[in-house]
Image (cartoon, rainbow, N blue to C red):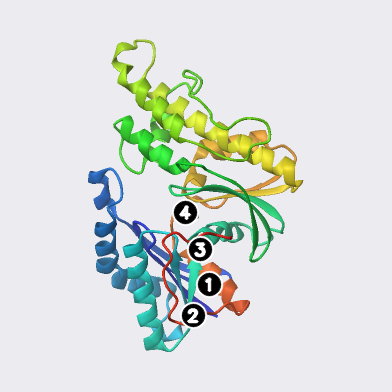
Amino acid sequence: MIVLGIETSCDETAGAICQNGQILASVLSSQSIHNIYGGVVPEVASREHERLLNAIIDETLKQAKIKKTDIDVISVTHGPGLAGALLTGVSFAKGLGLGLEIPVIPINHLEAHIYANFMADPSLQYPFVCLLVSGGHTQIWLIKKFGSYTLLGETRDDAAGEAFDKGARILGLGYPGGPEIEKLGKEGDPRKIAFPKALMEKGSLEFSFSGLKTSLLYYMDSFSEKTDVSKPDVAASYQFAIVEILVEKMKRAIDKTGVKTCVIAGGVAANLSLRSTLEKRLKGVKILLPDLKYCTDNAAMIAYLGELKSQNNKYEKLDFPIYPNLKLAK
């Protein structure tokens, strides 16, 4: 079976081909045009997807050395994400599916991030605990089996990735903020400033990052008056606070469930400090870290999950809608 995956949920335009669990090609174009705005502009993202999609899919097929007529199934992200961006990708997929007379499978973007871990290790066994952490989501899930997921905890306000992006803006850094803060923080002392860590009371699996962001804002208001602290120290300390919260909550989730396998998923999963801290602190636990190229938005995970759903006969009628606020489970 050959599956074409299409991803346009935010500011990455991507296509990929999956065959028998193997990614034959994965092509991605990040919309750098948003850098000048310090964040993603939804209307601009939609127009960029529309401009790029044909070329992206053509290049994907070329790299996979297949023709359009070789495709058996198309899978496409239908939520969550930006409404216009999702609509662009879904409309393209439906049109191509109609033309080729093949099924089109709607994919939950969050679920695809989780299943990107199976591309890193196909032997991954259920159940496992997943820290799903990105610009729009910070959640901990118990993954019992395919299609059976229980939410253990989530953020009450900002996501961790959003905290990185907004923190970078406060520090005068570029977008996306996570890599910028990580880069600057390498030169600083992560324990120089004790930024607050919310909802750390015993047993809580909930997150909150809005207070941390506000604390950074107030700190930088008087930063010019400080002579013993550098901006790399601030970046390192801010990142340290975010990572400490994520790792502590993950440890609690593992203790609560008794599950000894954990994975991380989403864009923030690419943060090297988070990865190394998880490996140091979670003793006696199997930790699976996805390939860096599959942490951020990509179509390989969409194609992979599409093939899995096809194998399990998870088809839907072609009139399926987009869901900008789609949840992983009720």
- Identify residue for label 3: 301
Q: Residue at x 28, y 63 (%)?
A: 46
Where disc 1 sits, the SS reads helix
- Identify residue for label 2: 73
Q: Which of the two labelled residues, at mark 1 and mark 4, occupies the earlier sequence position?
A: 4
**Residue 216 spot, x, y in % from top left:** 39, 26
Disc 1/disc 3 C-alpha distance (Å): 8 Å
Q: Is residue 178 above or below residue 232?
A: below
Q: Which mark is residue 71?
A: none
For the residues carrying marks 3 and 4, which lies nearer the camera in this image?
3
Q: Which of the two labelled residues, at mark 3 and mark 4, occupies the earlier sequence position?
A: 4
- Identify residue for label 4: 293
Q: Which of the two labelled residues, at mark 2 and mark 1, occupies the earlier sequence position?
A: 2
Q: Residue at x 58, y 73 (%)?
A: 309
Query: What is the tally of numbered marks visible in this picture?
Result: 4
Q: Is residue 281 above or below residue 289?
A: above
- Identify residue for label 1: 306
Q: Which of the two labelled residues, at mark 3 and mark 2, occupies the earlier sequence position?
A: 2
Under mark 3, the amino acid is Met
For the residues carrying marks 2 and 4, which lies nearer the camera in this image?
2
Residue 62 appearing in the image = no
Q: Which of the two labelled residues, at mark 2 and mark 4, occupies the earlier sequence position?
A: 2
Under mark 2, the amino acid is Val
Where disc 3 sits, the SS reads helix
Disc 3/disc 2 C-alpha distance (Å): 14 Å
Q: Which of the two labelled residues, at mark 1 and mark 3, occupies the earlier sequence position?
A: 3
Given residues 318 and 300, the one toward you in this image is 318
For the residues carrying marks 1 and 4, which lies nearer the camera in this image?
1
Where disc 2 sits, the SS reads strand
Which corner quadrant of the image does residue 53 belong to? bottom left
Answer yes or no: do the residues labelled 2 and 1 have beta carbons within 8 Å? Answer: yes
